[in-house]
């Protein structure tokens, strides 16, 4: 399973960290970084990311 954030696209809105606090966190640069592997939740966060910066693959 792969969960990735395209940090060039991420605008740091924090949506993914609200949806999946166990899987995403905003780092010191204000962009999302992957800290866990909750696949189902990451899929939901990917759907809600306004700039489609989250990539999830089985
Ligand atoms: S939802 Fe998308 S744009 Fe917002 S912080 Fe997460 S990865 Fe970045």
Image (spheres, rainbow, N blue to C red):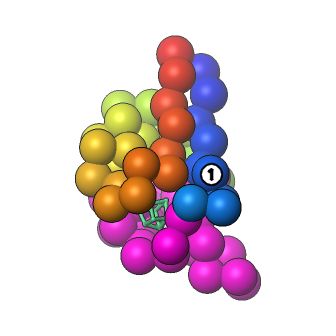
Residue 41 visible in the shown view: no
Q: Is residue 13 magenta?
A: yes
Residue 27 visible in the shown view: yes
**Some atom of ligand 1 lies within 8 Å of the CB belonging to the residue at label 1:** yes
Which quarter of the image is occupied by the N terminus? top right
Q: Is residue 22 magenta?
A: yes
**Residue bearing the label numbered 1:** 6
Which segment is the magenta one? 10-34
Residue located 54% across and 64% down the image: 10
* 10 shown above or below 26: above
Could you tell me how many numbered marks the image carries? 1
Q: Residue furthest top?
A: 58
* 1 shown above or below 38: above
Relative image position of residue 25 (x, y in whole percent): 56, 67
Residue located 71% across and 82% down the image: 29
If the picture is divided into quarters, which one holds ligand 1? bottom left
Relative image position of residue 20 (x, y in whole percent): 39, 55
Residue located 36% across and 36% down the image: 43
Relative image position of residue 24 (x, y in whole percent): 53, 58
- Give whichever of 5, 36 is nearer the camera: 5
Disc 1 secondary structure class:
loop
Classify residue 12 as left or right of residue 16. right
- Give whichever of 57, 39 is nearer the camera: 57
Classify residue 54 as left or right of residue 27. left
* 43 shown above or below 49: above
Residue located 52% across and 37% down the image: 55
Relative image position of residue 2 (x, y in whole percent): 62, 28
Q: Residue furthest right?
A: 28
């Amino acid at each position: 399973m792969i969960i990735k954030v395209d940090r060039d696209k991420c605008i740091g809105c924090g949506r993914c960290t609200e949806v999946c606090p166990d899987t995403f966190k905003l780092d010191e640069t204000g962009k999302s970084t992957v800290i866990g592997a909750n696949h189902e939740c990451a899929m939901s966060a990917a759907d809600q990311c306004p700039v489609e910066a989250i990539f999830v693959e089985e």
